[in-house]
Image (cartoon, grey):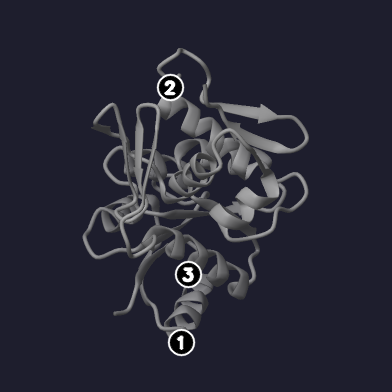
Amino acid sequence: MQSTILLADDDIELSGLLKEYFESEGFQVRLAADGVAALAEARKPGLDLVVLDVMMPGMSGMEVLKKLRKVSELPVIMLTARGDDMDRISGLELGADDYVPKPCNPRELLARIRAVMRRGQGPGEQNLIVVDDLELNQGSRTLLKSGNPVELTSTEFSILAALLASRGEVVSKRDLYVSALGREPVPHDRSVDMHVSNLRRKLGPDPRGDNRVETIRGIGYQYRVA
């Protein structure tokens, strides 16, 4: 079954070229040329992922992402201006799964799309990890906290799964990039840091009132256990 992606960008020529390339790689592609149309398309059923440009008329990509995250955890890859760290950080804070700077290499963007979609599929079998008040199911890719569901993006889920699987041990940032984002880290990339920050906010303290995820400076992160 073909996967369907939404490409939201007001650069009509670029969108047409990317659409042709992605379709040649087996994807179905929907297009949106402004933020209002992008949000409307993203809310329709049948989508597997959104590629969302930050700068669009009508409604910015950031505003689209903010509104979308209120109703959906659909995977989103942001297209940001090269070197604009604030756009990248803001996008990750709002729940983007990854970002690609523009102008982008179509092959790199395709690789990021496939990496994010692989994370969303998860393993075929049931695989429970229970730590404190958290119950993480890798088969259904769901998380319960004290029996209540917690909505996580695909990337947030993958990072938390890696931390819980190695609870009490330090997980390097590089390992989190490879396992959760499907790529090697690049200089000045704070993607994992921002996803961990989102996890801390969504999960809150552990039952003892402590921070769940500890930063190990210069190395990575550790999920604390009593």
Identified at 74% across, 38% down, the residue is 219
Q: Position of residue 97 (x, y in %)?
A: 49, 50
Between the C-alphas of marks 2 and 3, the distance is 43 Å
Identify the secondary structure beneath mark 3. Answer: helix
Amino acid type at image mark 2:
Gly
Which one is nearer the viewer's eye here, 102 or 130? 130
Between the C-alphas of marks 1 and 2, the distance is 44 Å
Compared with 44, 132 (above or below) is above
Amino acid type at image mark 1:
Ser
Q: Residues within 10 Å of mark 2 (few under 14, many from 20)?
A: some
**Residue 221 can be seen, yes or no:** yes
Which one is nearer the viewer's eye here, 123 or 87? 123
Any mark on residue 24, and which?
1
Amino acid type at image mark 3:
Ile
Label 2, on which residue?
204
Q: Position of residue 166 (x, y in %)?
A: 56, 42
Identified at 47% across, 69% down, the residue is 12
- First of labels 2, 3 by sequence position: 3
Tell me if 100 is positioned left or right of 65 in this view.
right
Any mark on residue 79, and which?
none
Q: Residues within 10 Å of mark 3 (few under 14, many from 20)?
A: few
Label 3, on which residue?
12
In the figure, residue 222 lies in which quadrant? Answer: top right
Most extreme residue toward the top, as rendered?
A: 209
